[in-house]
Amino acid sequence: MSIRTHPAGVSLMGHDKSRSSVSVGAVDWNDPHLDALLQKVDGWKVDNRSDQPPQEVQIHVSSGWTANSVVSKPAQLISIDEQTMVLVTRFPLPQGDHVRVDSQQAGGTRSVWGWIIEGREGYRVEDREHGLFLNKLRIG
């Protein structure tokens, strides 16, 4: 592990493989146990989601410069932290679109703004059966 300094003065940690003092040992790629394990995990698609139940929300997608280009649709909020949120929709959301997410709280409606940074079709069987998409938003 090495620490480099970015031109702006920010320290960056990076792994310099040529100077690494960590050895993982030799790997026998012909070992039948390793081959069996690799065959088991081949094709896995990791799809981590929060354990909390999805929350019904209303999203307002801004895909242009005028107010007439705002589209409002239902979605489900399945995960949120200080920087990101993950929504499930029945339609793809283009990367880069600006989205307002409205949720009902005890004190009224809460609105959070975000940008679509990633979107894809769901991997799970039930996602495919219902035509669901997972969309990651950067809050801000």
Image (tube, helix red, strand yellow):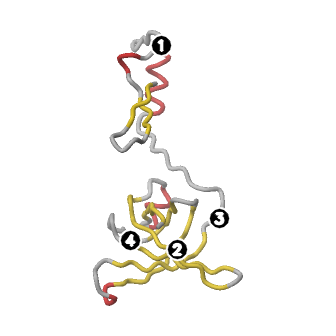
Q: Earlier in the sequence, mark 1 or mark 3?
A: 1
Q: Is residue 70 left or right of residue 136?
A: left
Can residue 134 be seen here? no
Q: Are marks 3 and 4 in contact (CB under 8 Å)?
A: no
Q: Position of residue 63 (x, y in %)?
A: 31, 77
Q: Position of residue 12 (x, y in %)?
A: 42, 37
Crowding at mark 4 (Cα within 10 Å: few <14, some 14-19, many 20+):
some
> Mark 1 is on which residue type?
Ser
Name the residue beneath numbered marker 1: 23
Alpha carbon distance from label 3 to label 4? 20 Å
Q: Earlier in the sequence, mark 1 or mark 2?
A: 1
- The residue at 33%/64% (across/down) is 95
Tell which of 46 and 57 is nearer to you: 57
> Mark 4 is on which residue type?
Phe
Crowding at mark 3 (Cα within 10 Å: few <14, some 14-19, many 20+):
few
Which numbered marker is on residue 35?
none
Name the residue beneath numbered marker 2: 112
Q: How many marks?
A: 4
Q: Earlier in the sequence, mark 3 or mark 4?
A: 3
Q: Earlier in the sequence, mark 1 or mark 4?
A: 1
Describe the element under mark 2 as helix, strand or loop: strand
- The residue at 65%/64% (across/down) is 53
Q: Earlier in the sequence, mark 4 or mark 2?
A: 4
- The residue at 31%/85% (across/down) is 69
